[in-house]
Amino acid sequence: MLKKAKENKYAVPHFNINNLEWTKYILEKCNELNIPVILGVSESAIKYMGGVNVISAMVKGLIQDLNIKIPVCLHVDHGKSKEVCIQAIDAGFTSVMIDASAQELPENIKITKEVVDYAHAKGVSVEAEVGHIGGTEDNITGSNHNATVEDCLTLYENTKIDALAPALGSVHGFYQTEANLDFITMKEINEKLPIPLVLHGGTGIPDEKIKKAIACGISKININTELQVVWANAVRKFLNETEAYDPRKIIGSGEKAIKDRIGQIVTLFQTKI
Ligand code: 13P
């Protein structure tokens, strides 16, 4: 999925999922648009939904019952330990992110390599992070420090990961000031590494900067907060305007907002099959 995106200079969307309904809306909309999609599941979302086996079975079931024909990747987002990645791989996830970016580079390489060895033996792809992407993710707030070209090369050469998320100024959640992305380093990393690059913290980055990031080699863009916001606004409005109590109606009142926003996002990303 990402190799094609890198070659043809577009980005594949990664949307974080929270429950059955979100997964269904994302799959339906991407299938309607005939584009590939990555379903990202954070560790807290794994716990929330019951575990990796529930999620894997849910996604498989939805693909079958909804007759979804597009390429779908089920991906662990920011797996903090080797154990969570292994559990997800064993449950049928097709991709994992091992995020050992809180560690010094040698330890990051060691943990990432262990995950790569396990994943590649099972045909599963691995994303890793260099530097540290700041902002708020899974209710944890951290500060940003940017990746260097040398560290990215060292991690890649020692692990043979499939995709890399270099911290280059994007943050998770809302931006306090406009996103300050280091496009020069992004372009250099892209030229020196043969693998696709990932942009985390896709919410709130102006359209022009998204386009520039794709031109500089970004092939996967992670979106979480943005879909939460459009969904929550729609549900809030619905609850204020009705006396609804049926959970299906309440949750479903955010469906159109999610689907409409996905349509806009993937037009910007120029996603193709
Ligand atoms: P946002 O919440 O800023 O969209 O970031 C999502 C993300 O990067 C998930 O890994």
Image: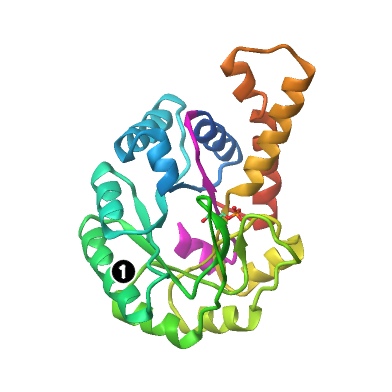
Residue type at tag 1: Thr
Q: Is residue 89 above or below residue 163?
A: above
Q: Which residue is painted at 50% across and 37% down in the image?
A: 18
Res. 73 in view: no
Position of the N terminus by quadrant: bottom left
Q: Which residue is painted at 64% across and 71% down in the image?
A: 215
Res. 14 in view: yes
Q: Position of residue 90 (x, y in %)?
A: 23, 46
Q: Is mark 1 within 8 Å of ligand 1?
A: no
Q: Does the magenta portion include 9?
A: yes
Horizontal placement of 230 versus 38: left or right?
right
Q: Position of residue 260 (x, y in %)?
A: 70, 37
Q: Which residues are magenta?
A: 1-20
Q: Which residue is painted at 27% across and 63% down in the image?
A: 115
Horizontal placement of 142 versus 48: left or right?
right
Q: Does the magenta portion include 252?
A: no
Q: Nearer the viewer, residue 154 or 1?
A: 154
Q: Nearer the viewer, residue 263 or 232?
A: 232
Q: Position of residue 79 (x, y in %)?
A: 38, 56
Horizontal placement of 115 versus 241: left or right?
left
Q: Position of residue 186 (x, y in %)?
A: 58, 78
Mark 1: secondary structure: helix
Residue linked to disc 1: 112
Q: Where's ligand 1: which quadrant?
A: bottom right
Q: Going by the picture, which residue comes out furthest to the right?
A: 241
Total tally of numbered discs in the picture: 1
Q: Which residue is painted at 49% across and 85% down in the image?
A: 149
Quadrant of residue 110 within the rendered picture: bottom left
Q: Is residue 42 above or below residue 145?
A: above
Residue count near mark 1 (Cα–Cα under 10 Å), binned few <14, some 14–19, many ≥20: many
